[in-house]
Amino acid sequence: MLTACFHEYHRSMNVTAIRSSLLHCLRDPGLSGDASAVEYLPDAITLVRDGYIENVGPAEALLPTLGQGVSIDDQRGKIMVPGFIDTHVHYPQVDVIGAYGTQLLDWLSRYTFPAETKFADRAFADTAAAFFLDRLLENGTTTASVFCTVHPQSVDAFFTASEARGLRMIAGKCLMDRHAPEALMDTAETGYRDTKLLIERWHEHARSLYAITPRFAPTSTIAQMEKMKALSHEHPTTYIQSHVAENKAEIAWAAELFPGHRSYLDIYDHYCLLRDKAIYGHCIYLDDADRARMTAAGARPSFCPTSNLFIGSGLYDLKQAIAAGNVVGVGTDVGGGTSYSMLRTLGEAYKVQQLQGTSLSPAYALYLATLGGAKALSLDDKLGSIAPGKEADFALLDPKATPLLARRTAVLDDPLDTFFALMTLGDDRAVAATYANGVCVHSRPG
Ligand code: GUN
Ligand code: ZN
């Protein structure tokens, strides 16, 4: 069901001034969190025109300059943050979230592949895409890098729904021509052809961006890997998304299927699938040479803490990745992951780093979910901070959303401490409203 304010999207675009407090990153604050990289305005005006941020600054300075026709959306008490960016998620896995008792390879065959077969049905895919996007929006997420299924119609369903909501989204059809149920396989040739058609239909259409999507190396033959190499060369502005080095049994299987490679990552490298705009989920078991190669090639890891914990994959070492120069994003990876909430995902990211003796600062956590995520997706010229000229995607967080949050945040003075409380205790209840393309696409009732 669409939220009430979604319908405003279809009205003509105009100028709106939103009054709230505002918290965002101006640059990379580093893992330990250089507070000077973060800007906080206790009472700000964000002026939005035709989907873009036109101006932002203290209310005291901007209010007197606003023209007569400018309506003010008064959100005082809420904290505006850039729309969250989920760098790795599967929309067709809405029905397998929280599936009991397996690790990656069994989880795929027992739960995930059967669920994905349903997306051959366009009507089913339409409903799931709408449901999924409404979950993202209620969690303040406005951009994601999204896996569809092998079925081209699952991509049509997804982009139709995301464009109806005015969203900037990256998505693609899974390429998989072996080691999957018959109903979920393409061939090297049909995968190539269908991907090309989808790129022509959706890449850079409205705010949509296409990702060439090898599911993971074990479900593609060498012939299909060769076709993906061709696709990547023929369409250099597209994205690439896949999985790598997530689970030990998966890594052993990939080595068996592709003998002679130095590492799992090297398989993708061999087929020219490491480049700028290539995002790899998990990357838990990369070694130093792999991490250096990711940096040199411009490929980006997506850290998926709730998934890595839930399906028992392992602990991602963020400090090591950053030291190697990797540009890391964070992903929910639902349905391996257990929440669409980037706040909760950051809370789990913090715990995963704690287990390895590193404290993820609230400033860096905010960065990972916003400007850092945008950078990981090469979209930081458009997204990730609240600055003139950027696309007007943001969320309004409510530090008093629950009795516990209200009590905890009442004793905090520092806005970054408040953000830390939100990522430790918050979820969709803490997202009062979400705006995409300058329009309110979700507002929490009450
Ligand atoms: N590896 C290959 N496919 C998948 C998937 O759907 N989820 C996760 N977490 N890992 C994968
Ligand atoms: Zn995944």
Image (cartoon, grey):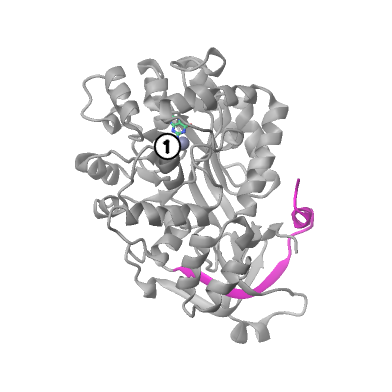
390 with respect to 39 (left or right): right
Where disc 1 sits, the SS reads loop
Q: Is residue 236 above or below residue 367?
A: above
Q: Is residue 318 above or below residue 47?
A: above
Q: Is residue 399 visible?
A: no
Please state if 381 lies on the left or on the right of 410 as rendered.
left
Asked whether 38 or 191 is in front, the reply is: 38
- Name the residue that disc number 1 marks: 236
Identify the residue at horizontal 20%, vertical 43% (top origin). Answer: 288
| Number of marks in the rendered image | 1
The picture places residue 3, in percent across and down from the top left corner, at 75, 53
The answer to whether 223 is drawn above or below residue 295 in the figure is above
Q: Position of residue 22 (x, y in %)?
A: 55, 73
Label 1 packing within 10 angstroms: few (<14), some (14-19), many (20+): few
The residue stretch that appears in magenta: 1-25
Q: Amino acid at mark 1?
A: Pro
Query: Taking 251 as reference, is 294 above or below it?
Result: below
- For image coordinates 47% across by 38% down, the residue present is 238
> Which quadrant would the N terminus be assigned to in this image?
top right
Q: Is 203 within the magenta?
A: no
* Residue located at (27% from left, 23% from top): 255
Task: Residue 7: say if magenta.
Answer: yes
* Residue at disc 1, CB closer than 8 Å to ligand 2: no
Residue at 57% from the left image edge and 68% from the top image edge: 405
Quadrant of the image for the C terminus? bottom right
Residue 203 in percent (x, y) is at: 55, 38
Residue 201 position, x and y percent, is 61, 33
Q: Is residue 90 visible?
A: yes
Where is residue 237, by image quadrant? top left
Q: Extreme top residue here?
A: 182
